[in-house]
Amino acid sequence: MQNPLEITFHNTKQNSEIETVIQEKFEKLKQISPDLTKCHIVLEKLSKHHQTANTACARLDLKVPHISDIVISEKCNEDEESLKSAVIKVFKRSQAILREEKKHRRDRNRTPRP
């Protein structure tokens, strides 16, 4: 797949600054796991109810061969800075998971010989 990155804004305004942050974080993910086949991030406003007003969610869905699907979400306020912070947190967690999986696969292949 040429470009596995998909960015979706659902019930929120499209923001070029947040898209730039997503592109930068995606490039770091590709360095950790070059065989990444899907990276879909959804930024959405959750609800218009009074008790949960102005809440949003950043959800990241990753697919990497030989690893189960990775889905990470982070709730935040709807303002731009909170969304950007949520995007950064989601990508940091995904980087940690991918590094751990990569280490686990590498260690599993290093079985000692008798």
Image: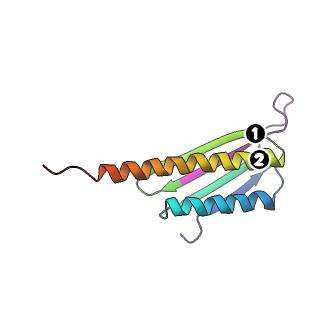
Which residues are drawn in magenta? Answer: 46-62
Q: Give the residue drawn at x 75%, y 50%.
A: 84
Quadrant for residue 20, please give it.
bottom right
Above/below status of 51 relative to 36: above
Q: Amino acid at mark 2?
A: Leu
Q: Position of residue 85 (x, y in %)?
A: 73, 46
Disc 1 marks a residue whose amino acid type is Cys
Percent across and percent down for residue 98 are 49, 51
Left/right of residue 12 with respect to residue 40 in the rendered view: right
Point out the residue furthest to the left here: 114
Task: Check disc 1 and report its element: helix, strand or loop.
Answer: strand
Q: In this figure, which residue is indicated by the disc labeled 2?
A: 83
Can you name the residue that lies furthest to the top here? 51
Instruction: Read off the residue under disc 1.
Output: 76
Which of the pair 31/40 is nearer the observer?
31
Of residues 108 and 54, the one drawn nearer to the viewer in this rendering: 108
The residue carrying pointer 2 sits among few (fewer than 14), some (14 to 19) or many (20 or more) residues within 10 Å by Cα, namely: many
Whether 52 is among the magenta residues is yes
- Is residue 62 visible in the rendered image? The answer is yes
Spot the residue most to the bottom.
2
Label 2, secondary structure: give it: helix
Disc 1, disc 2: CB below 8 Å? Answer: yes
- Name the residue: 81% across, 57% down: 14
Residue 101: within the magenta?
no
